[in-house]
Image: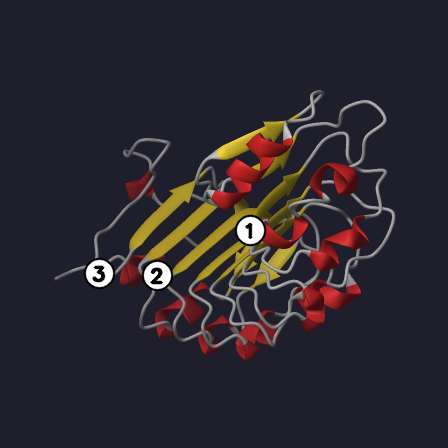
Amino acid sequence: MALRGVLNIDRRVPSRWRLRSAVRKGKNIQFLGLPKNMTVQEILADVLPDITRLHLTGGTSNEDYSFLEGASSLSELSLWETSLGPIDFTKIPLTTLALDANKHWVSLKQSQTLKELMLGYGDLSWVPTQSPLEELSLHSMGRDRDLSRLSALPQLKCLELHGGGELSLAGIAELTVLEEVELTSFASVTGLEELMHLPNLRKLYLEDIKLVDTTGPLYKLKKRAWVWVVGTKRWHREFRAVTPITTYSARRSN
């Protein structure tokens, strides 16, 4: 989530003038903690309808965030703690959302405005298929890893998946506008040949994959995309001579 100026709130409550000024300038209102005997709702009461960016982090987890449904201008939200009450995301015009909580947000599935979504934990079945999603990041994938579920996201350009266990790329070829794919920390990844059917793919990043075929499909992709392979255990001899940070790269041919 890109930040255009930040107002940090920790143990001291900002003056009403300072808070209004930050909101008017479109700054990200970031809670690093809470002043004693104060709640997020109390601090934001006067500016809630006008806030466009909000980041809730440490020290705010014991509050019911359902009041955010009244944030009629909120477009970017980061929520890094599990709240006590559910939030109906369909009532907030969010375009960018980051959730770290290990919780199934039922209303997330019905959201129709999101363009960027980051889930610290979640199944692919949680992803809102009615939203014009362009960027999707799952940092701890659940059991549902059927990539064909994403076929309902025709505008998806960037896909970032992290998690243990096995991952099959079967079905990813249906995401025809996909430009960037990042896969990290899997026991194995199969179906790399599916990536050859993505006409707009320009970046592939593989990191900490214990078992992956670094031969055929990757060499074909090098003609039109950047390819990075970092920290895998099955190496092809040509990858060894390159730096460990960018193990292999190839530029899109002109």
Amino acid at circle 2: Gly
- Foreground residue among 169 and 157: 157
Residue 45 x/y as whole percent: 73, 44
Which residue is depicted at the point 70% across and 61% down?
123
Residue lying furthest front in this view?
17
Q: Is residue 98 left or right of residue 248?
A: right
Tag 3's secondary structure?
Answer: loop
Residue 41 x/y as whole percent: 77, 43
Which residue is depicted at the point 21% across and 58% down?
252
Contact between marks 3 and 2 (CB within 8 A): the answer is: no
- Tag 2 residue: 216
Quadrant assignment, res 220: bottom left
- Badge count: 3
Q: Is residue 128 visible?
A: yes
Residue 241 x/y as whole percent: 28, 33
Tag 1's secondary structure?
Answer: loop
Residue 99 x/y as whole percent: 67, 49
Q: Tell me if mark 2 has few (under 14), some (14-19) or many (20+) residues whose alpha carbon lies within 10 angstroms of its own.
A: few
- Tag 3 residue: 223
Name the N-terminal-most of marks 1 and 2: 1
Tag 2's secondary structure?
Answer: helix
Against 98, residue 87 (above or below) is below
Q: Is residue 238 left or right of residue 185?
A: left
Per the rendering, the mark at residue 52 is: 1
Contact between marks 3 and 1 (CB within 8 A): the answer is: no
Name the N-terminal-most of marks 3 and 1: 1
Amino acid at circle 1: Thr
Name the N-terminal-most of marks 3 and 2: 2
For the residues labelled 3 and 1, the Cα–Cα distance comes to 42 Å
Single out the mark in the foreground, 3 or 1. 1
